[in-house]
Each structure stands twice: as C-alpha cells, then as structure tokens.
Image (spheres, grey):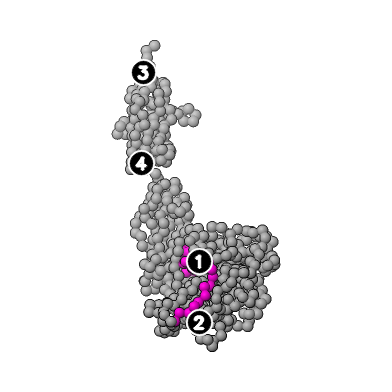
C-alpha cells in the first residue's frame, strides 16, 4: 500500500479488502497490546463528517504508509503476513526529533502526571504527520531547515478554513495551512503553542516547541492516555478520521516495541508524495488517483473458521524472541501499568575547571551537568538547554548562543566548546532543564585581552635623523604569542628617559598628534591581522644624542629601539 493522503484514502473494494486483510493478519499474531477492534459509533460518525476546525491539523492530509512487519521464525507456526507499505523499512528516529519527544514526555510527567503521555505516541503522530520532520532535517536548535506546510485548506479537495493568522505561520493570508513537524493549523497553534526550547518564541516549525504543544493538546480535558478510550479520543481530536486513528495506533504499537536513534537528516521518509512537503504552494495538492497496482495477497487465517477482523483491529506483530514460539507469554505483574520512569529532581555541575580564554581563542573547559533523580541516580534522555548569557560576543563553536544536549546513560550532558569573541570581561554559561522546580546551574566564564609574548623589529636599518628633521624610515615590529603571529594585541609606544625607566621624556624625538603638536607617548595601538605594528613618523627636536623608544604589548612583550639624533652641520 503506497503512502497516500489521509481522509482521501482509496475507498474502493480492492483497497478496503487489502487493508482489512493486512490488519487482520496483524490481529492474528495476538501480540501483547494489540489494538482493539472497535473504535465506537461516535468515532465512525465523526469520521463521516469531521469538523475540521475542531482538530489540531484541520483534518489535513497525512502519510498513510504503515510500518514494516516482522514474522515469527519458528517452524510450522509462521503466519504468511502481507507486506504493509512499499517504502523502505523504518530506520530509526532522528536524534533531535527523538530528544524532543522524550523532553515533552518528561515535562508532562511533571506538569500532568495523570495524563501518562508516552513519547511513542508523539513519535507515531510525528511519523504520520511529517515523516519525523522530513527525516530529521532540523538545525542544532531543532528548527526545520525549510517550512513544512500542508496543502492550502481552501475547500478544493480539502477542508475550507479561512485565514486566522494573517499568514504569520503559513505564509497564506487567505486560507490556513497545517504548519510544522506536528502539522498544527494556525488557529490551534495560537491556543496550544509552546516555547519548549526557551528561546522566547513559540515556533510551530521547531520540533521541541511542536512536540510539547502536541503533548499538551493530547492531554487536555483531563485525559489519561493509558486508558484505551482516552487514547483513541485524543488521537481522533488530532485528525478526525478513522483511517488516521488506525494508522497512528499501528505506528504507536510499532514504536512501543522499540526503535533507535539515527543522526539528524538521515531518517527514512514514508514512500510516495507526502502531505507535508517543503515550501508554500500556490495551489492545493490534489488527491493522488487510485493505483492500478494490485495489493498484497490476503493472509492465511490461523483458524479457517475465523472471519478476518475489521480494519484497525490489530497492531504489528511482536518481534520473534530467542527460541521462537507462537504467542508471547504474558509478563509478570500488571501489564497495563508501565514501570515508572525516573524523574529529574536536580541538575548539578560536573566540571570544576576555570572557564577562561583569550579573545579570539577557544575555551579549553566545557560546561557539563548531570541530571539525577530524588535518590541521586542519573537520569538518561533528559534535554539540557545550554545558554550563553551576558554582555559578550562569545558563542558556542556552532555559532549559536543557545543549544540543547541530551543526557547519556550516566545522566551527563556536555555543551560544545565556546569560542571567545573580541569583547573582554565575564559572562555566564547557564544550563537548565524544562522541568518544574528543577533549578538551573551556572558557570562563570571570562575573556581576557589578546596577548603577545614576543616582539621583533621587521627591519635592520639604523634609525637616525638630524636635529630638527624627520627620521628616515618608520618603526615596524612583529608580535607573536607562543610562536604564532598575534593579531589584535593592544600596545603602547613611549619615548623613555632611561633603559630602566618608563616615564615619558619631555625632550628629544617625538610623534605628532592630529594638530601637529609633539607627542612622546602613544596609547591604544593594536597589531594588525599579521601581528604587525607600524608606528607613525618620528621627528627630532633640536636636542642631539641617543634616545630610547620602548614598545610594550598586552601580555608583557617589550622591545626597546634606539633613535640617534645628530647635530646639524656647521654653517
């Protein structure tokens, strides 16, 4: 079955029979937690005439490809299951997308513990709505690299929803469109939008914001998603279609059995033309015509006297376990009560080094924190937000001042290195989690001025002048730091009284200010990009003799240059 637009699923006899056969085969596996067969008359009625404005997506199209199946391998017990979906097998969830789902689950475990929202439900909806943000094409902050927009909801093939946001989110000031990786219509986002990544914006194109908003939406009306009735009601409120419910439940069951993380941008998109393709479209995306490709063969029933179940009655088959076997033995205890997940109670610093760097260089120390529960045990998969705060131009090496990292098995998350800018002084690196009553931690960092530890002249000509004349040539020096050229280093140049002194002279060679007045000390000099410092022209007064010019840089590099003034020739 190729990926199609939901709500316009092919309703011909062939497709219906294929879907029924496929879902019946899933039901025949008797996997634990299989999807119940009845959705209720109220849901069927809602599907027949859905009120688009009352759903999160405006009943926009969605991917209908179903997950791959795994057939048990024990001899004489295998069921000849059909292949559902023609696209490549599911290959994991992109890292940022998975982190966003888990962060939303963690946040709602604190704010709405009675909802029991599992991140796998968000993953199922995200897969169906946008193919996990188009395979995880998001930047370091979780924002999609290009807009994900559904078709124009102008009533031609889709619902008719007039513009509610003046095009702010969807770029359309006439009609609304579903927006972002969780496909919210603007009117719904206006109510449920969240700022989960703490950047001060509620952005439907950001996976962290969108995932938390989806969780809040699914949990409202005091729903308990561990109850089948509330779970179905929540999914139908997202898109009021029976086919949509069946598709989401199938992916939900699939993700409940396990998945893995893949790098951002490498996720597998559902096959076929999706409902959430990049960029605005001047005209609505039409419904694909029915395919003439024959569907898969119906399954072999395990019991000849058993009628196939209705579509939506079963979930994907449980992967085979060592030793094979027909049915999975029931777990001990109450299978309907999942083990409680650890909840973050505090975060603590793990780094102890000093965060200091010279302007323009990279900090050697990195900010690092550990998330722990009430018993002090590490908590994995917690999203930590690192932010550079203060009057500074320092940035993380990615060029950003705010980014997120997920804690590992040891509960630790480490920020990338910080690149110091040119602005000196102190600033703060703040780490926080989006969990109520969990305080953040701060590292103090400082940027020092650029330094030089070596100065050499770039020429070997003796600097001489007759009394009352201009010196031939100019003083030019090269600054280095640890053997490398030292650009942007502050320096001073002073005509000194003696080799062991530092006070400026009141006679002898001098520079000129803007008005032509003598100056014997220059401040606020700076080496250029090559570490070179060239001084302005030097002039001699009527005093003959040998004089000293001292050049000093930030960091302690010093160089003394001799200047010789000869008496003018006799008249």
Question: Which span of residues is magenta-colored?
Answer: 77-104
Could you classify mark 1 by the number of other residues whose Cα lies within 10 Å: few (under 14), some (14-19), or many (20 or more)?
A: few
Q: Is residue 93 magenta?
A: yes
Distance from label 4 to label 2 (Cα)? 72 Å
Q: Earlier in the sequence, mark 1 or mark 3?
A: 1
Between marks 1 and 3 in the image, the one whose residue lies nearer the viewer: 1
SS label for mark 2 = helix
Quickly name the residue at label 2.
28
Q: Whole-percent x and y of residue 440?
A: 43, 64
Give me the residue at 55% from left, 76% from top.
297
Quickly name the residue at label 4.
484
Number of numbered discs on residues: 4
SS label for mark 1 = loop
Could you classify mark 2 by the number of other residues whose Cα lies within 10 Å: few (under 14), some (14-19), or many (20 or more)?
A: many
Instruction: State the image quarter where residue 277 is shown.
Output: bottom right
Q: Earlier in the sequence, mark 4 or mark 1?
A: 1
Give me the residue at 36% from left, 53% from top.
364
Instruction: State the image quarter where residue 519 is shown.
Output: top left
> Do residues under tags 4 and 2 come within 8 Å of each other at their CB atoms?
no
In the drawing, does residue 249 fall left or right of residue 510? right
Quickly name the residue at label 1.
88
């Amino acid at each position: 079955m190729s990926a199609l637009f939901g709500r316009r699923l092919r309703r011909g006899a062939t497709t219906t029979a294929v879907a029924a056969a496929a879902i019946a085969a899933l039901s025949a596996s008797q996997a634990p937690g299989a999807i119940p067969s009845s959705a209720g008359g109220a849901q069927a009625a809602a599907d027949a005439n859905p009120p688009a404005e009352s759903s999160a997506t405006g009943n926009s199209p969605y991917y209908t490809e179903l997950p791959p199946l795994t057939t048990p391998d024990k001899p004489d017990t295998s069921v000849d299951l059909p292949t559902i979906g023609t696209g490549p097998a599911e290959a994991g969830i992109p890292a940022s997308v998975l982190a966003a789902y888990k962060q939303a689950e963690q946040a709602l475990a604190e704010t709405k513990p009675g909802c029991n929202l599992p991140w796998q439900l968000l993953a199922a909806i995200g897969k169906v709505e946008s193919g996990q943000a188009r395979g995880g094409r998001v930047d370091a902050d979780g924002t999609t690299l290009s807009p994900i927009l559904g078709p124009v909801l102008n009533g031609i093939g889709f619902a008719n929803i007039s513009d509610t946001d003046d095009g702010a989110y969807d770029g359309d000031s006439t009609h609304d469109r579903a927006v972002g990786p969780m496909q919210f219509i603007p009117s719904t986002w206006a109510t449920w939008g969240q700022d989960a990544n703490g950047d001060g914006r509620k952005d439907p194109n950001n996976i962290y914001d969108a995932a938390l908003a989806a969780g809040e939406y699914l949990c409202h009306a005091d729903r308990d998603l561990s109850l089948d009735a509330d779970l179905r009601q929540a999914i139908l409120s997202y898109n009021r279609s029976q086919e949509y419910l069946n598709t989401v439940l199938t992916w939900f069951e699939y993700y409940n059995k396990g998945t893995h993380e893949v790098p951002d941008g490498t996720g597998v998109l559902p096959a076929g033309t999706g409902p959430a393709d990049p960029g605005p479209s001047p005209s609505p995306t039409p419904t694909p015509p029915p395919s003439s490709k024959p569907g898969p063969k119906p399954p072999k029933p395990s019991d000849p006297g058993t009628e196939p179940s209705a579509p939506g009655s079963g979930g994907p088959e449980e992967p085979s376990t060592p030793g094979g076997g027909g049915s999975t033995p029931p777990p001990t205890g109450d299978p309907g009560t999942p083990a409680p997940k650890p909840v973050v109670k505090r975060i603590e610093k793990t780094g102890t080094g000093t965060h200091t760097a010279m302007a323009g260089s990279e900090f050697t120390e990195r900010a690092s924190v550990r998330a722990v529960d009430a018993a002090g045990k590490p908590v994995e998969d917690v999203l930590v937000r690192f932010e550079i705060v203060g009057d500074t131009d320092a940035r993380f090496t990615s060029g950003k001042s705010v980014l997120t990292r997920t804690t590992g098995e040891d509960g630790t998350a480490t920020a990338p290195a910080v690149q110091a800018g040119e602005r000196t002084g102190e600033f703060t690196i703040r780490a926080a989690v989006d969990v109520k009553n969990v305080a953040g931690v701060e590292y103090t960092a400082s940027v020092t001025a650029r330094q030089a530890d070596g100065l050499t002249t770039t020429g070997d000509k003796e600097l001489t002048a007759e009394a009352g004349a201009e010196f031939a040539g100019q003083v030019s020096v090269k600054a280095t730091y640890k053997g490398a050229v030292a650009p942007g280093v502050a320096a001073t140049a002073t005509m000194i009284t003696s080799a062991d002194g530092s006070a400026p002279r009141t006679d002898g060679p001098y520079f000129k200010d803007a008005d032509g007045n003598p100056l014997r000390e220059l401040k606020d000099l700076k080496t250029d990009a090559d570490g070179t410092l060239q001084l302005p022209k030097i002039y001699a007064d009527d005093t003959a003799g040998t004089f000293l010019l001292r050049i000093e840089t930030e960091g302690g590099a010093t160089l003394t240059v001799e200047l010789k003034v000869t008496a003018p020739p006799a008249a």
